[in-house]
Image: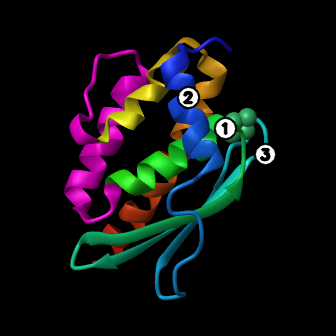
């Protein structure tokens, strides 16, 4: 897979020094998800207060794309309302469709834009975001 150099460096930095890797206390919402095509998995935990994601951590095993995406995603959603977090998940889906999307102060995420040229890897990049959507959906259903 050929990604441009800068993007590759950003991805490898998140892969080797993941942000928010770890676990939260057991009152947090836990979402386990795997990528059926390869078996790689993520366990995402979000701490929710009043419809806001106040903290997020993840564990799991996967390729550099899936794990770096989880690192970037957890950074992006901390402190966000559900609405804002879902809005970001939608922006990320648009990025994976090759649409020109900007993440402003979270520009690291744009490093994954090149993945849209490799359809098999899109599932890697969206794994963490899908876990987030699932977590928020289940929280919304509880209310
Ligand atoms: Fe499994 Fe990327 S190859 S998540």
Magenta-tinted stretch: 77-105
Q: Circle 2 is placed at which residue position?
A: 9
85 is within the stretch colored magenta: yes
Q: Tell me the crowding category of disc 1: few under 14, some 14 to 19, or many 20 or more residues within 10 angstroms, Cα based.
A: some
Which secondary structure is most common in the magenta stretch? helix
Q: Please tell me which residue is depicted at 53% across the width and 13% down the height of the picture.
A: 4
Q: Which residue is mark 3?
A: 39
Left or right: 55, with 6 as reference point: left
The reply to whether callout 1 and callout 3 are in contact (CB within 8 Å) is no
| Of 7 and 116, the residue lying toward us | 7
Above or below, 91 relative to 83: above
Q: Quadrant of the rendered structure where residue 32 is? A: bottom right
* Label 3 vs 2, first from the N-terminus: 2
Q: Is mark 1 within 8 Å of ligand 1?
A: yes
| 74 and 116: which is toward the camera | 74
Identify the secondary structure beneath mark 1. helix
What residue is shown at x 24% (from left), y 44% (from top)?
87
Q: Earlier in the sequence, mark 2 or mark 1?
A: 2
Q: Nearer the viewer, mark 3 or mark 2?
A: 2
* Among numbered discs 1 and 3, the one appearing first in the sequence: 3
* Residue 83 horizontal/vertical position (percent): 21, 56
Q: Residue at x 52, y 79 (%)?
A: 24
The Cα–Cα distance between marks 1 and 3, rounded to whole angstroms, is: 14 Å
For label 3, count other residues whose C-alpha is less than 10 Å away and answer few (under 14), some (14-19) or many (20+).
Answer: few
Query: Residue beneath label 1, please?
Result: 64
- Disc 2 residue crowd, few under 14, some 14–19, many 20+, Cα 10 Å: few
Mark 3 residue element = loop
Ligand 1, by image quadrant, is top right
Q: Disc 1 or disc 3, which is closer to the eye? A: 1
């Amino acid at each position: 897979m050929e990604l441009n150099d800068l993007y590759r460096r950003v991805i490898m930095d998140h892969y080797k020094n993941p942000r928010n890797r770890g676990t939260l206390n057991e009152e947090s919402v836990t979402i386990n998800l795997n990528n059926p095509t390869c078996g790689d998995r993520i366990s995402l935990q979000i701490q929710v207060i009043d419809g806001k994601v106040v903290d997020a951590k993840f564990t799991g095993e996967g390729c550099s794309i899936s794990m770096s995406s989880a690192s970037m995603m957890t950074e992006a959603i901390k402190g966000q309302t559900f609405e804002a977090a879902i809005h970001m998940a939608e922006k990320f889906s648009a990025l994976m469709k090759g649409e020109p999307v900007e993440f402003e102060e979270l520009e690291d995420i744009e490093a994954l834009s090149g993945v849209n040229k490799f359809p098999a890897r899109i599932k890697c990049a969206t794994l963490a975001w899908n876990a987030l959507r699932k977590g928020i959906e289940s929280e919304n259903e509880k209310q």
